């Protein structure tokens, strides 16, 4: 949601959007990951290989976003959000696997490349891990939504500092915009785990799909208004 706000409200360039938004993501997931760990909603056996792949991916994403123009950035990101929202809504009809059950995603040959892609897109767009984790874990592996959210938060919390440092060195962060985002991210991240714990899996999935649709519509409005 922060990416459309920065692109639409402030008209910030893609490279600066990615760096500035990634700071918000770090603040948000750093606080929420602790909550998910306390509530035992993190799959640590899956988080390790995903994290190992995500670190080099984060560095590659910082380099890649410098070659992206604004319109292409919005269109590709918006299409991804729409596709994900459709897939997420269809996921409501599928029964999740029991918590703790191993899936194909736990294999290192799958998890490490997925982690690399997660880190790449996270640094390119300044987002969390949903673009990769939703298709892989929530839909493909049919893992419980709460575990997917918690595990993704921990991975991003561990790997996004790499992207933030790389963006900062490259001068890709709008600090006046970043500071209020950090405050909001910390507050939101603290509140997210207890709220998610009270939501049923279908409601959590619906909320996620709604957020994806709103973000995609906001990006589309930028080019037609």
Image (tube, rainbow, N blue to C red):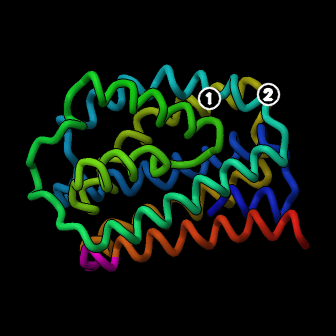
Q: Quadrant of the C terminus?
A: bottom right
Q: CA distance from mark 2 to mark 1?
A: 10 Å
Q: Position of residue 52 (x, y in %)?
A: 36, 23
Mark 1 highlights which residue? 61
Would you identify the image quadrant in which residue 64 lies?
A: top right
The verdict on residue 55 being magenta is no
**Residue 67 has which mark?**
2
**Residue 121 has which mark?**
none
Q: Position of residue 12 (x, y in %)?
A: 84, 50
Q: Position of residue 161 (x, y in %)?
A: 52, 33
Compare residues 216 and 51 and report the one nearer the observer.
216
Neighbour class for label 1 at 10 Å: few (<14), some, many (≥20)?
A: many
- Residue located at (60% from left, 55% from top): 182
Q: Quadrant of the N terminus?
A: bottom right
Q: Position of residue 133 (x, y in %)?
A: 39, 47
Range drawn in magenta:
198-203
Tell how many labels: 2
Kindly tell me whether residue 191 is visible in this rendering.
no
Compare residues 225 and 11 and report the one nearer the observer.
225
Mark 2 vs 1, N-terminal side? 1
- Residue located at (29% from left, 76% from top): 202
């Amino acid at each position: 949601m922060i990416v459309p706000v920065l692109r639409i409200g402030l008209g910030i360039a893609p490279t600066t959007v990615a760096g500035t938004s990634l700071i918000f993501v770090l603040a948000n997931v750093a606080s929420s990951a602790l909550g998910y760990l306390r509530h035992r909603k993190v799959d640590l056996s899956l988080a390790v290989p995903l994290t190992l792949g995500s670190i080099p991916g984060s560095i590659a994403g910082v380099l890649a976003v410098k070659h992206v123009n604004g319109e292409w950035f919005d269109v590709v990101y918006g299409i991804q959000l729409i596709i994900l929202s459709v897939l997420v809504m269809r996921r409501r009809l599928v029964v999740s696997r029991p918590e703790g059950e191993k899936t194909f995603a736990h294999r290192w040959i799958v998890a490490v490349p997925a982690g690399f892609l997660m880190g790449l897109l996270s640094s390119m767009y300044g987002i969390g891990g949903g673009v990769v984790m939703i298709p892989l874990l929530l839909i493909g592996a049919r893992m419980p939504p709460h575990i997917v959210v918690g595990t993704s938060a921990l991975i991003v919390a561990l790997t996004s500092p790499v992207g933030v440092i790389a963006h900062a060195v490259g001068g890709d962060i709008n600090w006046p915009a970043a500071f209020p985002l950090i405050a909001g991210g910390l507050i939101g991240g603290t509140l997210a785990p207890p709220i998610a714990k009270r939501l049923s899996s279908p409601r959590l999935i619906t909320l996620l799909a709604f957020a994806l649709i709103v973000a995609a519509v906001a990006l589309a409005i930028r080019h037609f208004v």
